[in-house]
Amino acid sequence: MSNNKPETRQRLVSSAADMISRRGLDATSIRELAKYAKVPLGSTYHYFPGGKQQVAVEAIQYAGDNVAHLLQQALEAGPIAGLHSFLDLWRSRVKQSHFQAGCPVLAVATEEPTDEVGLATLEAASEVFSKWRSLLAESLIKHGAEKAQANSIATLAVASVEGSVALCRAHRSLQPLDEIEQLLDELMRQAISQH
């Protein structure tokens, strides 16, 4: 029975991240989350006594950490490899969900924070975006880019990828991600080859 507890909690967190990526934060309720995760409603309150705010923040952190982990691994081969891996991750996510899911971090970042839940998840989203940006910038710097340029390119990369994911969902096409890939690749190559 104790082995099932972490599994149930983790299923709620990952289900919340998935729901937010599909429906947004406002349309994600504790009751709907329990149904979506196929767990008793009482389990959500047991594992998340802080209610929607607690589970939503943890869902954003979970999604952000998963992407950061994959990005960090890919960046071991350099910033270009990291960029392509970052793009492939989102291509796969959008395609596998049949263009129904995007990024839960972007979802909460674009909703108006009307209450404490919104403010807390917005803060979590800010931290996630900063982490992704820092990972890319650090890799660019490590491979020869100037710090200011690396920071700007990393910001552009995260913003471009997130925006392209939204465009992919709207257009039901991966073309927006394909279009930014070559431009970002060229920009990164120029930045690291100048030194």
Image (spheres, rainbow, N blue to C red):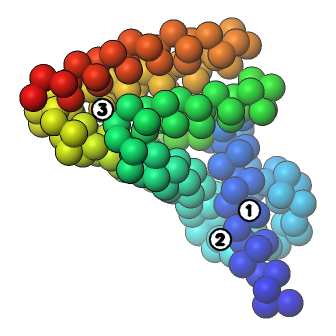
Q: Position of residue 178 (x, y in %)?
A: 56, 14
Q: Position of residue 52 (x, y in %)?
A: 63, 57
* Kind of residue sitting beneath label 3: Ala
Q: Residues within 10 Å of mark 3 (few under 14, many from 20)?
A: many
Could you say whether the residue bearing mark 2 is in a helix, strand or loop?
A: loop
* Kind of residue sitting beneath label 2: Phe
The foreground one among 160 and 35 is 160
Q: Do tag 3 and tag 1 residues touch (Cβ < 8 Å)?
A: no
Distance from disc 2 to disc 1, alpha carbons, whole Å, reads: 9 Å
Q: Do tag 3 and tag 2 residues touch (Cβ < 8 Å)?
A: no
The foreground one among 188 and 25 is 188
Q: Which residue is mark 2?
A: 48
* Kind of residue sitting beneath label 1: Leu
**Above or below 50: residue 155:** above
Q: Which residue is mark 3?
A: 154
Q: Residues within 10 Å of mark 1 (few under 14, many from 20)?
A: many
Asked whether residue 65 appears in the rendered view, the answer is: yes
